[in-house]
Image (cartoon, helix red, strand yellow):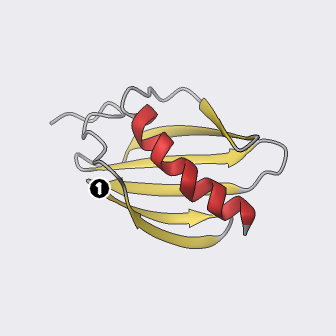
């Protein structure tokens, strides 16, 4: 469960950095754990953030819709409200 809590805690950082993210792989480190992820537009309102923890392979797939985030982290369903909405053009989607 430590991995799950780190992924959820790191998702706020993801939301902030994903705003300028291209389809290229990006990473962040939190509490000594490094996560690699990509973002892509699902449609005009939703962005998908997919990635894994380096070294452990714990995978996550999160769908961001405004300030709502849902998906799976290490096989466990997650759902939470982000501190701020992800811009709709975060991964190349047009308004």
Examine the rendered structure and indicate whether residue 26 appears above or below residue 81.
Answer: above
Residue sitting farthest toward the left: 95
Q: Residue at 54%, 37% (x, y): give it.
A: 38
Q: The C terminus is located in which quarter?
A: top left
Name the quadrant of the N terminus. Answer: bottom right
**Left or right of 88 in this view: 61:** right
- Horizontally, residue 59 falls left or right of residue 40, namely right
Say above or below: 52 vs 5. Answer: above
Near mark 1 (Cα within 10 A), the count class, few <14, some 14-19 or many ≥20, is: some
Total of numbered circles in the picture?
1
Q: Position of residue 72 (x, y in %)?
A: 56, 66
Q: Secondary structure at mark 1?
A: loop
- Furthest residue toward bottom: 77
Q: Residue at x 44, y 26 (%)?
A: 22
Asked where in the image residue 93 lies, by quadrant, the reply is top left
Reply above or below: 47 against 71: above
Residue at the right extreme?
55
Q: Position of residue 90 (x, y in %)?
A: 33, 34
Give the residue number, with chain letter if any, for mark 1: 67
In-image side of 55 versus 53 (left or right): right
Q: Residue at x 59, y 39 (%)?
A: 37
Where is residue 17? Give x, y as percent.
45, 32
The residue at 55%/58% (across/down) is 8
């Amino acid at each position: 469960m430590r991995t799950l809590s780190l992924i959820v805690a790191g998702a706020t950082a993801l939301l902030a950095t994903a705003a300028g993210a291209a389809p290229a792989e990006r990473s962040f480190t939190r509490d000594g754990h490094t996560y690699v992820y990509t973002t892509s537009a699902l449609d005009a309102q939703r962005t998908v953030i997919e990635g894994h923890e380096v070294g452990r392979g714990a995978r996550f797939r999160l769908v961001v819709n405004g300030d709502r985030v849902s998906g799976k982290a290490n096989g466990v369903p997650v759902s939470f409200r982000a501190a701020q909405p992800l811009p709709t053009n975060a991964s190349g989607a047009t308004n």
